[in-house]
């Protein structure tokens, strides 16, 4: 029984392993995330070019996070990859990849926590 369950548990944990750790965020990831935010990810169209928010979507700067609890990197990543059902926030906006989503999350997190340029 244990042997049968083990692979299931490992599979369930896999997505979490893909979540970037704040310690592994590099300037290159932040730059890539910024380009994506203002480009292919289409994030800017709803969240604003400086993450200030628009009528369509909330700001992504220092705030009471609603969906990305605490504004933690993993939670931001989860919102980008899972979306917020029933809202304009879809999973993988602009059809971005998982790697792109990780970079976009690293960018949003770094603007909030490391003074990265929006
Ligand atoms: C079509 C509009 C739209 C696009 C494009 C979009 N978002 Fe969103 N996003 C929203 C909306 C609306 C919400 C708020 C959902 C709700 O009502 O809870 C949201 C919520 C979020 C949140 C959670 C905010 C919180 O308060 O916890 C994050 C993080 C986020 N978006 C990041 C991104 C990123 C990164 C991209 C680009 C890869 C992106 N979004 C693209 C509309 C959009």
Image (spheres, rainbow, N blue to C red):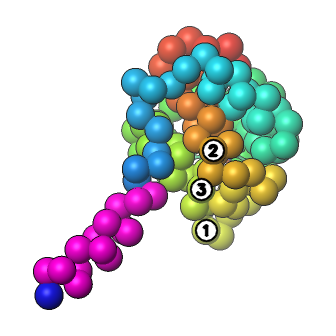
Q: Which residue is mark 1?
A: 85
Question: Depth check: 58 or 69 in front?
Answer: 69
Numbered disc in front, either 1 or 3: 3
- Disc 1 on helix, strand or loop? loop
What residue is drawn where x is 56% and y is 31%?
A: 106
What residue is drawn where x is 60% and y is 16%?
A: 27
| Region rendered in magenta | 2-15
Q: Is residue 47 magenta?
A: no
Q: Which residue is mark 3?
A: 81
- Disc 3 on helix, strand or loop? helix
Q: Quadrant of residue 34?
A: top right
Q: Residue furthest left?
A: 2
Q: Quadrant of residue 21?
A: top left
What residue is drawn where x is 38% and y is 69%?
A: 11
Tags 1 and 3 in contact by the CB under 8 Å rule? Answer: no
**Residue 79 visible in this rendered orientation of the protein:** yes
Q: Which residue is mark 2?
A: 99
How many numbered discs? 3
Picture coordinates of residue 43, whole percent (x, y): 76, 42
- Of the numbered discs 3 and 2, the one sitting upstream in the chain is 3
Would you call the spot at circle 2 few (<14 residues within 10 Å), some (14-19), or many (20 or more)? some
Question: Depth check: 95 or 57 in front?
Answer: 95
- Of the numbered discs 1 and 2, the one sitting upstream in the chain is 1
Would you call the spot at circle 1 few (<14 residues within 10 Å), some (14-19), or many (20 or more)? few
**Residue 54 visible in this rendered orientation of the protein:** no
Picture coordinates of residue 53, whole percent (x, y): 72, 35
Q: Is residue 9 magenta?
A: yes
Tags 3 and 2 in contact by the CB under 8 Å rule? Answer: no
Q: CA distance from mark 3 to mark 2?
A: 10 Å
Numbered disc in front, either 3 or 2: 2
Picture coordinates of residue 108, whole percent (x, y): 60, 30
Q: Is residue 110 left or right of residue 17?
A: right
């Amino acid at each position: 029984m244990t042997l049968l369950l083990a692979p299931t548990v490992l599979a369930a944990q896999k997505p979490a392993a893909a979540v970037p750790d704040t310690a592994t965020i590099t300037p290159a990831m932040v730059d890539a995330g910024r380009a994506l935010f203002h480009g292919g990810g289409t994030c800017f169209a709803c969240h604003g070019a400086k993450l200030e928010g628009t009528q369509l979507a909330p700001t992504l700067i220092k705030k009471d996070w609603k969906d990305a609890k605490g504004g933690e990197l993993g939670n931001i990543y989860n919102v980008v990859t899972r979306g917020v059902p029933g809202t304009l926030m879809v999973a993988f906006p602009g059809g971005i990849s998982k790697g792109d989503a990780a970079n976009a999350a690293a960018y949003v997190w770094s603007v909030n926590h490391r003074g990265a340029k929006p």
